[in-house]
Amino acid sequence: MTGLDFVVGYGVDDVGMRTSELAGQAGVNPETLRYYERRGLLGTPPRTAGGYRDYPDDAVRLLGFIKRAQQLGFTLDDVDELLHLDRGGPEGCDAARALAETRKADFEARIADLGRMRDSLADLIATCDLPRRDRNCALLAAIENQPPFPAEPMMIVNLEVLHVPDCPNLAAMLTRLRQLTDLPVATREIATETDASAAGMSGSPTLLINGHDPFRSPNQPDSAIACRIYRDEHGQPTPAPSTGQLRDAIAAGATVPTAQPPTPGEMLSSCRTRTRPPDPTDRAVHQAVLRSFATTGHAPPAAELTILAAGSGRTHTEILAALHHLDAIRLGTDGQVSVAYPFSARPTRHRVRINNQVDVHAMCAIDALGVAPMLERDTRIESTDTTSGQPVTVTSTAGHTSWDPPEAVVFLGAAAGGGPSADSCCDYLNFFTDEAAAKTWTDAHPHVPGQVLAQDEAEALARRLFGTLLHNNAP
């Protein structure tokens, strides 16, 4: 074994350890292990006969590398790139060299800055016996006149997966993309040869990156809507490209630089799109939870979910845990569903009356606006402006909305650091009586980046996030 090869695969002969044991040895939370698995940093281990995760001893070494890299100031995206380089980098020599040279230049710039700061501390040590005014420790001067790290250009990458109805390999493609990237992934159902040819589909599923199929080969199926089989790095058949192949394809497809970062609305849309369960059973359980919240304000009884889980090889609690890890729902410490976006099991400042019959609570302003298009029912939202306590009401009747006060807006923001929507952004997506009130709030909270949405913009975002969530063919 060389480098960190154990990241993507585990030897069946290794003597393994359970989740709690690995977490204890590495000094991390068990949830952190599962998060690293979802990101593709830590390979999914085999399971014992009793169903427990069985990690190899080398996983401790990997986790030590990740923790040390974070202590040195690297993000998890940086860590993923470093691990990719440790395994040899992209298939193409030129791409591998370019990636390695870019990271090497970054290291050298950091080392130079740290060297100047070290020299400043050495000057302080040498002069510490002098009066304070005569001591020399120009830490700020050591780096303030240095050019900033060059900003990496942001790339526009559009990912779209074309597939036939009920494609058995769609879930594998979407799961691997979600493990690999935070980019939004659109899906399009194709039913005819004519539509497939026009869309550039070469078997189901087909991934288009900026409209191009990076995996197209002369040996494609005769029918554009036939089942497509891919080959991994070892030439073995697989229902979707490996994460390494997808990573290289996305990197190669990112050729259009843009100076503008994605807006909070685009980031929220991307995040929520990735939380939609690709597995049909998971999706059925998720939709059952949403429908139950819409009629009762809480999740359905366990017996109902057990029926839906039957035949999947998993219990309903395992499926709920998978939905929690996906951030489609949130589970409380008691294991019960506390959040099923757009709904909250606990009271919030956003109350929604459905068809003038059922009162529910929404996680945020956008979630509240999403209830009507998701359920295709009339709603009345009652919320408050957080700066003044003044009421804000939005009524949706037969698809038409009216706002009171008429000047009301929505602020869309998120805390730095990411994480589940319930923790990172729901508290910052609120109604305000007008744009001036929203500005008053943002001026008092400069650490919360975001944007003010006009009414039509907020409604359009809500429809995009929730409008198809209960559709059976929604990805």
Image: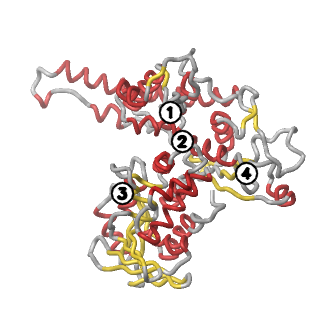
Picture residue at 64% right of the left edge, 49% below the top: 157
- Tag 2: residue type? Glu
How far apart are the alpha carbons under marks 4 and 2?
37 Å
* Left or right for 81, reference 403: right
Q: Position of residue 287 (x, y in %)?
A: 54, 61
**Secondary structure under badge 2?**
loop
Label pair 4/2, CB-CB below 8 angstroms: no
How far apart are the alpha carbons under marks 4 and 3?
41 Å
Q: Which residue is mark 4?
A: 167
Q: Nearer the viewer, mark 4 or mark 3?
A: 4
Picture residue at 47% right of the left edge, 81% below the top: 355
- Tag 4: residue type? Cys
- Tag 1: residue type? Gly
**Secondary structure under badge 4?**
loop
Q: Which residue is mark 3?
A: 448
* Vertical arrangement, residue 23 with respect to residue 437, above or below: above
Picture residue at 37% right of the left edge, 71% below the top: 350
Q: Which residue is mark 1?
A: 51
